[in-house]
Structure formats: structure tokens, C-alpha cells
Image (cartoon, rainbow, N blue to C red):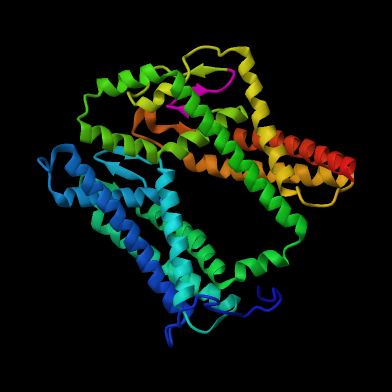
């Protein structure tokens, strides 16, 4: 590892391949931005084309319609809202967004292997700007070309989403590939690294718990979900495509499950509520995954106990982050644990905010969690869980020593 206080890093360390003579990191990053956008766009178009053929062997429409649908899907993965003849679709399939982030991250690392020379922080920032700029240009072009009378993607949200995907994914890829990310982490205080790791582990644990909740609910409602599937009258190809589209929304379902475990729950339609203490839904669309939703009416009182889950997740994250450290004083351990839980609450709130969005007009224009309540409950409950976890670990470490 390079000296973290040295802002200059030699590129292509240990790659075993000769650097492309004269290619700067900025030029390689610009090419990486084009490649990342192009490859992920082609993947989405290929999937749409495959679904079109599976549906009716191409009997309806043409390849242009399928390719345009793939381009629309790519834009929706960036958070763009799609207006389909007055029907507004604004829920981002987060599995697709994760694929886009992975694509830009890999492209950023690829750029560092193709560049020559050295990289300081200014060079890295220039390269990141080049990657993001090229990525956004492709996104804008796709948005303009894909716009037609029956399907209109939102340009503003497309630009914002492409900026975020390019900056987060591509920027981290460049920083990781050059080694500057490791150097920055070395410069950070140890307590800050522990807090970041603990918050990430806590948030991921709560998402996993939300996914488990959805899976268990679907398992108990399997007969109802199967009946809904049968009632749709889908062919084998349609059923495969429909299942794939629902899987793209799996992270959204897991995050809404996390909002339920936190207490505020979520709404699936205007005027609806799904929480551990009250359920008011009314009629819902005939989607198999919605069979996991509870029945209307007051839930059993013991369901309030699910509020313990976020606290346990925060305690686990705090313990994992400090598993190989020396014991702290109880007050300091409590402070760091509470900080870890609070940061985890902020992280999970941001993630839950991305999970909602409209799936039409009228009743389905409001789907998602009440973010102010989620932030309050998540930081409070997970902060308390982190505090208990930190003090418990300090006590256990003192016993061992």
C-alpha cells in the first residue's frame, strides 16, 4: 500500500500488463463512462427483446418497440419516471439500479488498468468528472431518443440519476483501482472506520430481516399467490417475463419490509397503511407478491415485538465493527455504539426513500414509507440497540481480559 500522506499514486500497480502509452486517466475514464452506459443499455435491450420473443414469438409489435422498452427500463433504473399514455410509473426497480452501479464501478476500475502515469487527488477528480460526464451524455441521448407519444421518460430525473450512479459507482471504482480509496481509509480515525463498518452492517442486517419477513409472509400466503398467478392467465413465456420483472423489485419489497419492522410501516395506495399495529388496505392489484400483505384489521398484539429486530441489528453491527479491538470505557463504548446505530438509521432511511414511488395514477400514486417517521424511529431504535451492543461488548471484553 502507498503512503497515505502521499497524494500521488502510481497507476496500474501489480496488473502485469503494459500501460497504454500516452493514455491519461481522464481519457480512460471517459471511455469507461461510455462503455458502462453502453454495456448496461445493451443488456437491458437484450432482456426486453428476449421477453418480447418469449411472450408471443414476436407476433405483436416489432423489434423497435422491444428495444425502446429496454431503453425505457434502463432509464427507469436510474430513477426516471415514465409516463405511459397518462399512466405514471415512478417506482425504481432497485435490483436494476444495483446492476447499473456495479457496471460503473467495474468500468472505473477498468479505466485505472488502462491508464498510464500517476494519479493524485486532482487527477482522480478530473477522471471522475470525465466518466460521469460521458455517462450522463449517453443517458440524455437515450432519454431523448426513447421519448415518443405513448411513453415519455422524465429528463430531469434521468440526469440526476445518471449523475448519482456515475459518481457513486464510477467514482468508487476509480478510487479503488488507483488505491486512493485505501489511502483515504488509512487517514480516517479508527473510530470513524468502526462507525462506518458498524452502520453498514447494521443497515444490511435490517434489510436482510425485511427480506426474510417478505419471504416468510409469501410462504404463508403461497396458495393465495398461486391463485393470483393462475388467474392472470399467462403463457409460459409471459409468466417467466412477469416473474423476472417482480424479481427486479425484490430489494424494494425488502426495504418496505424493513420499514414495517421499524414501526412506521408503509402505504400501498392513497389512504392505506401497513404497520405492526394497524392495517388498512382495501382492494389491491392482482400481483402475486402482494399476497404477502397482511389482511385488513388490527394485527395481533404480539407483532409489536418486531420493533426489537432493528435494535438487535444495530447491536450486532456494533459488535461486528469492534470484534478485534481493545475494551473501551463504558461511557465511550455507549457513545460509539449509539453513534453507530444512529448512522445506521440514517442509512436505512435513505435506502427506504429509494424504494417507493407511484405505480399509476389515482390510488396507486402513493406507495412507500413515511420518511420523517422512519427517520425518527430508525435513529432512535437503532441508536438504542447500538448503545446496548457497545456496552455489552465492552463488558464481555473486560471479562475476557
Can residue 369 be seen in the rendering of this structure?
no
Task: Note whether 276 is above or below 91 in the view shown.
Answer: above
User: Does residue 139 lie above or below 246 as drawn?
Assistant: below
Which residue shows up at 41% across the image and 73% down it?
30
Determine whether 57 is above or below 46 in the image: above
Magenta span has 272? yes
Q: In this rendering, would 42 be left or right of 363?
A: left
**Residue drawn at point x = 41 percent, y = 38 percent:** 249
Comparing 141 with 107, the one in front is 107
**Front residue of this view, candidates 21 and 66:** 21
Q: Is residue 206 visible?
A: yes
Task: Please check the rendered image and state whether residue 139 is part of the magenta-colored stretch, yes or no.
Answer: no
The image quadrant where one finds the N terminus is: bottom right
Picture coordinates of residue 268 (x, y %)?
A: 44, 27
Q: Toward the viewer: 265 or 96?
A: 96
Q: Is residue 284 above or below residue 358?
A: above
Decide if residue 325 is on the left or right side of residue 51.
right
Residue found at x 64% / y 66%: 182
Q: Quadrant of residue 310?
A: top right
Please state the horizontal and vertical placement of residue 199, each as a whole percent of the image. Answer: 66, 46
Residue 342 in the image: x percent, y percent? 70, 42
Question: Which range is magenta?
Answer: 267-277
Secondary structure that dominates the magenta span: loop
Amino acid at each position: 500500500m502507498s503512503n497515505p500522506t502521499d497524494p500521488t499514486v502510481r497507476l496500474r500497480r501489480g496488473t502485469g500488463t503494459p500501460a497504454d502509452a500516452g493514455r491519461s486517466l481522464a481519457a480512460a475514464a471517459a471511455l469507461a463512462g461510455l462503455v458502462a452506459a453502453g454495456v448496461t443499455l445493451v443488456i437491458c435491450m437484450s432482456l426486453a427483446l428476449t421477453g418480447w420473443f418469449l411472450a408471443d414469438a414476436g407476433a405483436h409489435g416489432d423489434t423497435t418497440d422491444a428495444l425502446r422498452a429496454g431503453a425505457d427500463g434502463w432509464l427507469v433504473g436510474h430513477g426516471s419516471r415514465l409516463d405511459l399514455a397518462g399512466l405514471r410509473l415512478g417506482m425504481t426497480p432497485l435490483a436494476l439500479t444495483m446492476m447499473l452501479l456495479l457496471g460503473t464501478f467495474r468500468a472505473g476500475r477498468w479505466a485505472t488498468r488502462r491508464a498510464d502515469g500517476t494519479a493524485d487527488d486532482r487527477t482522480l477528480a478530473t477522471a471522475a468528472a470525465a466518466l460521469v460526464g460521458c455517462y450522463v451524455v449517453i443517458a440524455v441521448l437515450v432519454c431523448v431518443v426513447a421519448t415518443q407519444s405513448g411513453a415519455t421518460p422524465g429528463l430531469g430525473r434521468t440526469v440526476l440519476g445518471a449523475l448519482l450512479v456515475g459518481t457513486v459507482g464510477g467514482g468508487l471504482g476509480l478510487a479503488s483501482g488507483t488505491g486512493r480509496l485505501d489511502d483515504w481509509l488509512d487517514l480516517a480515525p479508527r473510530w470513524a472506520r468502526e462507525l462506518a463498518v458498524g452502520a453498514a452492517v447494521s443497515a444490511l442486517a435490517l434489510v436482510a430481516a425485511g427480506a426474510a419477513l417478505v419471504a416468510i409472509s409469501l410462504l404463508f400466503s403461497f396458495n393465495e399467490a398461486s391463485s393470483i398467478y393462475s388467474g392472470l392467465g399467462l403463457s409460459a413465456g409471459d409468466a417467466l417475463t412477469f416473474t423476472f420483472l417482480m424479481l427486479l423489485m425484490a430489494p424494494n419489497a425488502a426495504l418496505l419490509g424493513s420499514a414495517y419492522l421499524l414501526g412506521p410501516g408503509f402505504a400501498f395506495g392513497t389512504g392505506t397503511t401497513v404497520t405492526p399495529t394497524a392495517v388498512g388496505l382495501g382492494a389491491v392489484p392482482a400481483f402475486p407478491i402482494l399476497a404477502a400483505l397482511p389482511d385488513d384489521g388490527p394485527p395481533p398484539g404480539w407483532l409489536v415485538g418486531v420493533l426489537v429486530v432493528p435494535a438487535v441489528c444495530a447491536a450486532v453491527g456494533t459488535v461486528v465493527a469492534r470484534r478485534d479491538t481493545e475494551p473501551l470505557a463504558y461511557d465511550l463504548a455507549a457513545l460509539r455504539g449509539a453513534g453507530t446505530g444512529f448512522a445506521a438509521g440514517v442509512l436505512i432511511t435513505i435506502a427506504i426513500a429509494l424504494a417507493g414511488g407511484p405505480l399509476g395514477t389515482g390510488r396507486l400514486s402513493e406507495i412507500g414509507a413515511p420518511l420523517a417517521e422512519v427517520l425518527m424511529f430508525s435513529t432512535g431504535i437503532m441508536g438504542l440497540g447500538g448503545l446496548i451492543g457497545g456496552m455489552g461488548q465492552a463488558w464481555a471484553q473486560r471479562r475476557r481480559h
